[in-house]
Image (cartoon, rainbow, N blue to C red):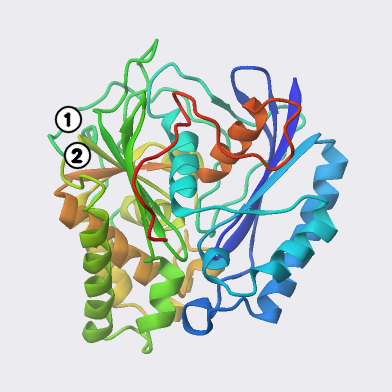
Amino acid sequence: MSRVAAIDCGTNSIRLLVADYDGSRLHELTRRMEIVRLGAGVDRTGELAPEALARTFDALRDYAAEIERLGATRVRMVATSATRDARNRGELVAGVRAILGVDPEVISGDEEAALSFGGAIGDLVGGSGQFGGPGPAGAPSQPDASDRSDASGQPGPSGSPGPSDARGASGVGPGAPGPMGTSGQLGKIGLSGTGGVSSVATPILLADIGGGSTELVFGDARGVRAARSVNVGCVRLAERHLRDDPPTPAQAAAIVADVHAALDLAAQTVPLTEAATLVGVAGTVTTVAALAAGLQGYDADRIHLSVTSAEQVAAVTERLLGMTHDERAALAVMHPGRVDVIASGALVLRTLVERTGAASIVASERDILDGIALALAIAPPAASAAVPPPTAPFLPTVAGPAAG
């Protein structure tokens, strides 16, 4: 059994996953997240700010100590949208090398999409069993306010799949909550499939809404068919357009216009309206799902593989747009690091749901961080700590240019 450490450095957060790999699945030991807002101001200045780099390096020193304590033998760190866009990315690379002893990979949008898909697909097709929850030596996960959500273990079966809409996720079962409504049992997709039988209708369109970019991946259990990364994320759009509290209708409309323009670009590569199931990863999606369910605290087990209807997404978005910063901060499931960007992220999600025509969206707590760890674990032992994602049925390479 090998022990690996994966680090995802996004626009809003930096996250760590340490896991054991037994040859077929990952067994999580610890999963941590810190909001560092590395991408603060990058859309405007084109550079990583000194204070943002300092916050990132402080978090990374803590991660390095944790990696050493747990004895991970291989480490891989990837940096995404904000670092791709920054002229001074070399400062980040040098700092990471000094702290971790490995160079971070500044990955392309295509690579980011492939890793996100690889991390999520295992729990969307029955019987794949790639990801296990924390073992006896593990620490519990934390609620996520990052670009990409954390999970606290893996939920068990939650019933049979509901009826499938032609362009939606598996149906919501009895007792599903209303928009921003009372708490209740979240609608869940079924987990009864075995031997590669899909628990959701395929093909899947996976949306990874991050802080700086959004990755859109079209594929199924056999691999990725098309992918595109576009520069619309919750931090980038909030910095670009949100000036008032709450936002004005004109500011919201400007974000929607940017998202539509990005989706027009993505549609040149990715068939946005042909998927049978829409799946979302990242903190925007999971937070919207928690709000739609009326949860009184962030519960990753309940959110993972939950189903939120298009109507609920629209209602949550409208409510968030009408709230002040303090009102959003008071929401039971809201992490402080997401308060100022959740409205812009929800607008990205709502616009995407409308463009795809999906009846609902499945939220996944498995994402790029899990994909990084899995790719590292299955790479040849002789390879360096920083390796490109391998080609495999559950972690394929992607086709199409990236714009992120």
Query: Which structural element holds mark 1?
Result: loop
Looking at the picture, does residue 270 appear above or below residue 19? below
Q: Quadrant of the C terminus?
A: bottom left
Instruction: Say whether residue 393 is left or right of residue 45.
Output: left
Query: Which structural element holds mark 2?
Result: loop
Relative depth, front residue between 344 and 49? 49
Q: Please give the name of the residue rendered at 55% of the width and 54% of the height, measured from the top-left corner.
A: 144
Relative depth, front residue between 257 and 320? 257
Can residue 228 be seen at all in this image of the molecule? yes
Relative depth, front residue between 166 and 382? 382
Amino acid on which disc 2 is placed? Gly
Looking at the picture, does residue 321 appear above or below residue 147? below
Residue 168 shows which numbered tag? 2
Tell me whether the residue at label 2 lies in contact with that at label 1, contact meaning CB atoms closer than 8 angstroms.
Answer: yes
Label 1, on which residue? 164
Residue 69 shows which numbered tag? none
User: In 3D space, how far apart are the residues under numbered discs 2 and 1 (Cα atoms)?
Assistant: 7 Å
Q: Please give the name of the residue rendered at 21% of the width and 27% of the height, measured from the top-left corner.
A: 162
Looking at the picture, does residue 154 appear above or below residue 303? above
Where residue 403 appears, as percent x and y from the top left, is: 38, 60
